[in-house]
Amino acid sequence: TTPYRGIEARLTEAVVQELNARRSPIRVVSDPGRADTELIGTITTIQKIPLNRNFQNHNREFDLVLTAEVVWRDLRTGTVLSGSRTPSPNER
């Protein structure tokens, strides 16, 4: 158990809400069988950066910085659309 327990679920929910709110053809579906693409991510680091302390030296305000590795893949072709990937011979 850590102070960040469940943060992956909250981050996933925030990404889903953002994608569904945008004016784009991208929509999140609940059935993986109907999906054209998939977005897979792993949180690699979490940093809590103090911004403001009170007279008792307790944090009053802080930034939370999440770093993640993300791969977006087209499920129809297997092509990686964004994120970590091995460059093709043409790109080297």
Image (cartoon, grey):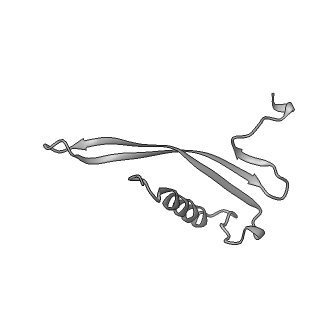
Q: Position of residue 12 (x, y in %)?
A: 55, 60
Q: Residue at x 71, y 72 (%)?
A: 31
Q: Quadrant of residue 30?
A: bottom right
Above-or-below relation of 50 to 1: above
Q: Position of residue 62 (x, y in %)?
A: 32, 46
Which quadrant would the C terminus be assigned to in this image?
top right
Residue nearest the viewer, comparing 46 with 91: 46
Above-or-below relation of 22 to 91: below
Q: Position of residue 69 (x, y in %)?
A: 61, 44
**Figure disc tally:** 0
Above-or-below relation of 7 to 17: above
Q: Residue at x 65, y 67 (%)?
A: 28
Q: Quadrant of residue 26?
A: bottom right
Q: Residue at x 82, y 52 (%)?
A: 78
- Which residue is outermost to the top? 92
Which quadrant would the N terminus be assigned to in this image?
bottom left
Q: Position of residue 85 (x, y in %)?
A: 74, 40
Residue nearest the viewer, comparing 20 with 72: 72
Q: Residue at x 47, y 59 (%)?
A: 6
- Which residue is outermost to the left? 55
Drawn side of residue 16 relative to residue 29, left or right: left
Drawn side of residue 85 relative to residue 48, left or right: right
Residue nearest the viewer, comparing 63 with 6: 6
